[in-house]
Image (cartoon, grey):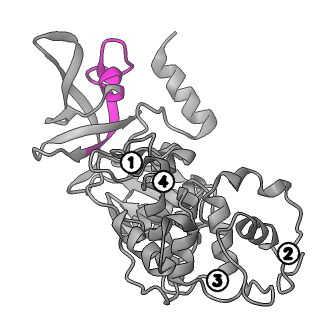
Amino acid sequence: MNRRFMYGTLAAVTGIVSVISYTPFTSLASTTLTQRKNALVSARIMENFDVTLNEQPVSRALFAKMLVMASSYHTMVSAESNVSVFSDVLTTSEYASYIRIAAEQGWLSAYLGGLFKPDQSIKMAEAEKACLTLLGYSNTDFEGNLVSNRHAKATAIGLIENITRGINETLTYEDCVNLFYNLMKSNTYSNESATKADNTIYGKLFGFTLTDNDDLNLLDTLESNLKGPYLLKSGKSLSGIIPFSESSASCSLNGETSSVDEIEDAASSRDPVVVYYNSSTKSVYAYSSSGTDMGTITGTIDSIYYSSTNLMTPTSVTINGTEYEIANDDVAYAFSVYGSLETNDEVTIVWSLNSEGKQEITAVAN
């Protein structure tokens, strides 16, 4: 059976183009706040929130929910009844179950008189105690001034990296993103003296892995719920691809912050835009022919080159007279004798600049 006919039929029926590679991201030398937030949202530790809330304080009630969703109890909350153990927390409150678990586990403490004060903003000292307890530390690990010694430990292990609040100051949404992101890449108490590895960090609970520089591997996380590639053609709307409203979408075009209008305007009759999206984070990643460090090209395959030592695996491809190196095994397979692409075929690729400044193909849609 003709494989190209199969691919074309699939695209016509489902609306999705043939997927050769799921890797629109190439590297993340350092993480941005948005990327850290998206990683936590993808893991369902935090709910997505508008950037206008970045500097707004987080309540103790909401922080209790974040703690539970960042714990082994995150899959058990639905089974909990909305029963409160505090007089100032209504049993009908959406946070009642989370507050109860956080209090019972000793992550958050009540105030004198048995009040939880759910609407009060969470303080740095409270947050440090809660996260250190999640890691496995207890009061016996901090002799003397508990608050001061916890703060010293949180600083030493990188738990409060990128947070500049004092121990009595309240945390914002941005602070909580950094705190829970740091929590995920911290060694647990039982692995405190071990070299950081995928199986020593707290984030292994959610399937997080580490990069070579001990940061979370956001490529794995961000791509875990990624859908695409889709081709957005001239005159078509992005709403025909993404399953969430355009107004709520967080967009990037060729690796830079963008908008729905800019993405739609970038699509032309000759050069469609390649689109990926993540429903949980409402993120849209688009690539067009105008990119400088990364982008797309639609054209005819002139030549496929192979290594002199391996005649089965292609090393580069010439499209419209420009040579592109091959970045990964999926792309190599697509252009190999076993794949679907041959010279004189028309193809749309996503390319990026590698460390040597050469263009390499990271994804293919046909």
Amino acid bearing label 1: Asn
What residue is disc 4 on?
189
Task: Please report the residue visible at 52 percent of the width from the left and 80 percent of the height from the top.
Answer: 125
Tag 2, which secondary structure?
Answer: loop
Amino acid bearing label 2: Val
Amino acid bearing label 4: Tyr
Place of residue 294 in the rendered image (x, y in percent of width and height, measured from the top left): 26, 51
**Label 1 vs label 4: CA separation?**
22 Å
Q: Say which mark, if any, is on residue 217.
A: 1
Q: Earlier in the sequence, mark 3 or mark 1?
A: 3
Amino acid bearing label 3: Ser
Q: Say which mark, if any, is on residue 59.
A: 3
Task: Please report the residue visible at 18 percent of the width from the left and 44 percent of the height from the top.
Answer: 354
Place of residue 173 in the rendered image (x, y in percent of width and height, measured from the top left): 53, 78
Q: Earlier in the sequence, mark 2 or mark 1?
A: 2
Q: Specify start and end residues of the magenta stretch as a single range.
A: 330-351
